[in-house]
Amino acid sequence: MMLSRTADHLFWMARYMERAENTARMLDINLKGMLLPQTPDQAARAQRSVLRISELESRFEERFPGSDSREDMLHFMVADTGNPSSIISCLHAARENARAVRGTLTTEAWETINFTWLEFGEKLAADELEKSPDMLFEWVKYRSNLCRGVMVGTALQDDAFWFIQLGMYLERADNTARILDVRFADAEPNSREAARQLEDFYYWTSILSSVSALEIYRKVYRDVVTPSRVVELLILNSQMPRSLLASLDGVCATLDKLRTSGSNECERFAGKLRADVLYMDIRQILETGVHAYLTQFLKRVDELGVRVMRTFLMLPLA
Amino acid sequence: MQIYDEMRHEETVRAHYARFSRWLSTQSPETITRKRAEADLLFRRVGITFAVNGDLSGTERLIPFDMIPRIIPGDEWRKLEAGLRQRVRALNMFIRDVYHDHDIVRAGKIPAEQVYTNAQYRPEMQGVSVPLDVYAHVAGVDVVRAGDAGEFYVLEDNLRVPSGVSYMLENRKMMMRLFPELFVQNRIAPVAHYPDLLLETLRSIAPAGVDDPNVVVLTPGMYNSAYFEHSFLAQQMGVELVEGKDLFVDENYVFMRTTQGPKRVDVIYRRLDDDFMDPLAFRTDSALGVPGLLTSYRAGRVALANAMGTGIADDKSIYPFVPDMIEFYLGETPILNNVPTFQCRKPDDLAYTLAHLPELVVKEVHGAGGYGMLVGPASTKAEIEAFRERLIARPDGYIAQPTLALSACPTFVESGIAPRHIDLRPFVLSGKEVTMAAGGLTRVALKEGSLVVNSSQGGGTKDTWMVD
């Protein structure tokens, strides 16, 4: 039992921290892609797909009319306080949500989040985004890992802890789907170019590394990297911690811990979504089209988030 | 004006500072610089910051922390403590009296109009009984030492929502982290049990029939300058930190909204002024309070700490009467001095004040935080003349006091170590018993010669040691 407002802050704190991490992961793929031979057209498309997948194209256009520069895109996604999904905005929102309930967090957890925010500002001020973006992304991942570890290592496993976990798993389900969708969303259906692009070995290995799954892939398949197996691994493998199924397993397990007399509907919705992924076959997904499948999935995750808010977090109107 | 130095008497170091002084002389300037940087970093990491706004610029201020402690010897502390307990007991009896029997007014000790037409008097509290007859559960009494002998004087009683206790606790934690050896060498009374004392006090005032009360801390929210303290105290006591919107009143009971439905609240340690507590009763534009709270409170269904209406006892226009209260209610001689006070509403006092403005401190009766006051000796002619006009226009809004030569304590400044003026805010808890942690918050005016210690005006803080 805890204050609804407190639960709300914890839930969003975790979501924003997870989002900051995944944005760093996604930008890292983009960066690695730059190291490979690319036509200018391909490069520009890769830029745009990062924005499209985060549903930020029009906002970017407002901030940087007509720009397709990589520097602008990176600045926008990392350091732009006017972009609510930029890493800086996410870290700030995570920290402000934490600050609002700092008494609920362990001292170590609060200090980790607070210091992440403070240090990130110092890193931007020291031009680390310009000098070594890959190191900066590594650092964001590292701090997010640290925050998660401190929670698990120090927090009492009460409702507060489960709301944090719930936020993290929900956000991760959403983010992994988006990372996976970057290339599919971009591909022109049925074009030869798209087919060739989709077979791009380097692209898929960078996707795997971005979710720390390249070694896992090797271990699971002991075979060459193919797009359909990457899709299978990141959607259907429940042992792969950042897969859609594993994220939904996490969501359902935490909802079970948080069960109240009024949470039945929400739990059922989550369970159904999980079951649909659990009993899905990779061939079915490929037949539907990965992009179409993920679009549908994202819509349902979004709806699940709304239901969680309605069930646990919203203050009844006075 | 002779200034009492806390550490030295003429050329000799006072006995209670001897150990510390020896230790200090062995510290190299580099060590001190490094420790100061370390303290700064730790405070920032812990997020003990204040005056935050919602923007992304990350400009949050730290209250400057000075590493030279203010040390109070045991015998002086015991006298001070006895004096504070006496004073707070009398003040609580006074508050009960002015909302019930009016004895002190009928006895002619305090003019009726001073009490009943005072903006701080809450007619809503007339005849309302509160648990244990205690009103000011948490008092943060501002005390200074002045004169050659370093006599203690009470400056203000602060019986509404006094803040600063978190700094007392965090400053101690910081000193222990930076200089553990000092705590091995000296017998320094611990203060870390303050949250336990506070919780015990709060539990003791639960409404009748509630055995295991649900205590909460009510904050105006995270943009309040004392938010760190609110959340710190809630965490240390292990109780919920709530905002007004988390609470509602139903059938005269107060509930909080939880993830599993409403849960009853029995005791509210509120860090919100009376005016904002209930938009139905007081300021209708307040979004910080809880509609219907006053009715519930008057019905005895929920306890508030501090009670509503305590402002009548710490008002500056009532302050001159506190020694009389101690004699009237307790039949005792006041242990602590009051500062002689001229009440400008009296023609004679006003005349004296106007004639002596350059040497007096003039304070607004309802002012706080070091605003709206004139420190005569530190003001320019123009400032004094401007203040004179305001005083003549509204004499009953002001009191005047001689400028006290506040004691000074060695403090790290740009040029090294130099004396700076300090005050002391000990915290007195009243519930079933009156309890205190041995120490308090020492504030220091960092500007040379300045007597204003408020953090909003460039003040810093020090750890406060009671040593035996």
Image (tube, rainbow, N blue to C red):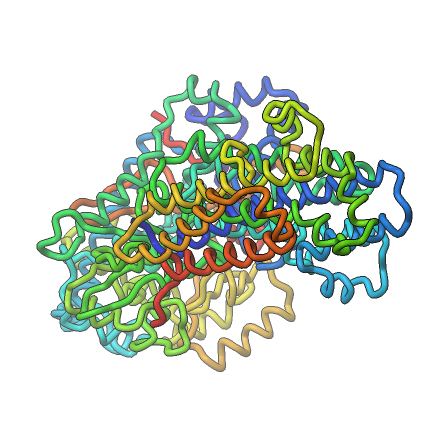
Determine if residue A24 is in view. Answer: yes
Which residue sits furthest bottom? Answer: B393
Name above or below for residue B210 compared with residue B176: below
Res B284 → quadrant: bottom left
Depth order, front residue of B376/A268 = A268
Name above or below for residue A30 compared with residue B360: above
Depth order, front residue of A216/B345 = A216
Residue at x-position 65% and y-position 46%: A179
Residue at x-position 42% and y-position 59%: A307
- Horizontally, is A63 left or right of B365 in the view? right
> Could you say where residue B262 lies in the image, as x and y percent from the top left?
25, 59
> Could you say where residue A189 lies in the image, as x and y percent from the top left?
74, 55
- Assign the C terminus of chain A to one quadrant of the image: bottom left
Determine if residue B424 is in view. Answer: no
- Horizontally, is B12 left or right of B280 in the view? right
> Could you say where residue A49 lies in the image, as x and y percent from the top left?
75, 53
